[in-house]
Image (tube, rainbow, N blue to C red):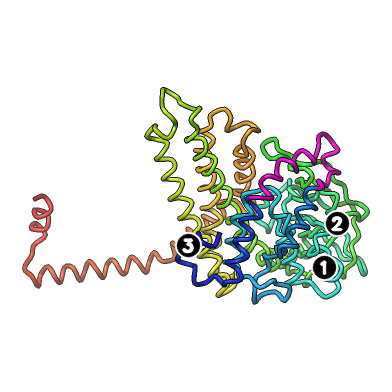
Amino acid sequence: MSAQIPIAVRDRVSDKAAKTLDIVAKFVDEECIPADTVFEAQVGVGEARWQAHPKILEDLKEKARALGLWNMFLPKGHYKESPGFTNLEYGLMAEWLGKSRVASEAVNCAAPDTGNMEVLAKYGNDAQKAQWLKPLMDGVIRSAFLMTEPQVASSDARNIELKMVRDGDHYVLNGSKWWSSGAGDPRCKIYIVMGKSDPNNKDPYKQQSVILVPSDTKGITIHRMLSVYGYDDAPHGHGHITFHNVRVPATNLVLGEGRGFEIIQGRLGPGRIHHAMRTIGAAERALEWMLMRINDPTKTPFGKQLREHGVILEWVAKSRLEIDAARLVVLNAAIKMDEQGPKAALKEIAQAKVLVPQTALTVIDRAVQAFGGAGVSQDTPLANMWAQIRTLRLADGPDEVHLQQMGRNENRRGKEVAAKIAGQKAKAEELLKKYNITRSEIGSNLKR
């Protein structure tokens, strides 16, 4: 809630955003978290899970719209469709949304739709916006983003192989995609697909294009839904999909041929911030569950409540420190995006993308440990939270890719800092001579 906004960013949050944040917090705590259990029950069992659309979700959407909570994610100053919040302001709201499974969709701020709507809002033409952006923003359809492929190392997007061949006024698509999140939902009507349209281009970053593919296009086959540590995430799902001679109108191309990398970078930057702040919310909820457990008077191992065992309070303290520090890293990235755009904030976005999931996983693991066997069961949200957040160390680029880039960029300062340190050493020698101090005297002073 607004009273908990970090003081370092408080003056950057408008009164409108602060009031909305309070409404979001109340909506999540009092409506969405209690609804999570009902949602899971209404999804059902077996194959019927992939045709389900829990009524409670639509009821929550109605409540959210009545409260003015809808499409808060499009940042002010970048999209004409924006409700007027900055990346920083929405980031604070996304933290609360991350505490509940249904909250993000209830306010039409769920991935991958948010990123896909940003693509259409930023790069789509008027016809594409009318056909696909409007129903997505109205929450009447859903979408999927198809980039990762099973047969190549997709962490290097230059490896993407799905063929996009121009044939008159159409493109013909052939290839395979997986981890197509959202493709299982019966309301998923549009795929945003990245493929290779110009494999012979000398610039490897201009070989790819992005095209809009209606999900019911002939030649598309959904082979299976992939599980995440055993969770199927129905009805959302993560599809393994093939394209066999799929014909798509050339007018469905986004921005132009060879612009794929430009589009996906514009899409992934804000999305990583959204993921990170939702993950902070999940970590906060895990800490709440841990606090409940360690203060449960019925749980007294070795004659003491858990909070009376020394290591437990250390877990609580470390969790608070780590969550608060990680939050500031994300908010710093959001501020830089607001002021200079996603491209200028690549380093800060990468820092948040790497740090936050690792932090949250550590906090959740402590909570699981506090609960013992219950912590890995369906009786708490912790096991599912851990499974979902573990994927974020892979999604939108594995940690190692971001760390390698950050390390390479940081190492560029090597010559500069070596020269600086050499200069400092030389100045120190001059000062030693000036004050008639020998090196042997320095050593003897240190030993005293």
Question: What residue type is disc 1 on?
Answer: Lys
Q: Nearer the viewer, mark 1 or mark 2?
A: 1
- How many residues crowd mark 3 within 10 Å: few (<14), some (14–19), many (20+)? some
Q: Position of residue 329 (x, y in %)?
A: 49, 60
Residue designated by label 2: 189
Q: Quadrant of residue 353?
A: bottom right
Front-lying residue, 154 or 282 = 282
* Residue 113 falls within the magenta-colored stretch: no
Residue at image coords 91%, 52%: 219
> Marks 1 and 3: which is nearer the front?
3
User: Which range is magenta?
Assistant: 30-55
The residue lying at 88 percent from left, 60 percent from top is: 172
Between 419 and 187, the residue placed more toward the observer is 187
| Labelled disc at residue 378 | none
Circle 2: element type? strand
Amino acid type at image mark 3? Pro
Q: Which tag, 1 or 2, sits closer to the chain's start?
A: 1
Which residue position holds label 1? 134
Alpha carbons under labels 2 and 3: distance apart: 40 Å
Which badge, 1 or 3, is on the more N-terminal residue? 3
Q: Position of residue 357 (x, y in %)?
A: 55, 49
The residue under label 3 is 6
- Figure check: 417 above or below 325: below
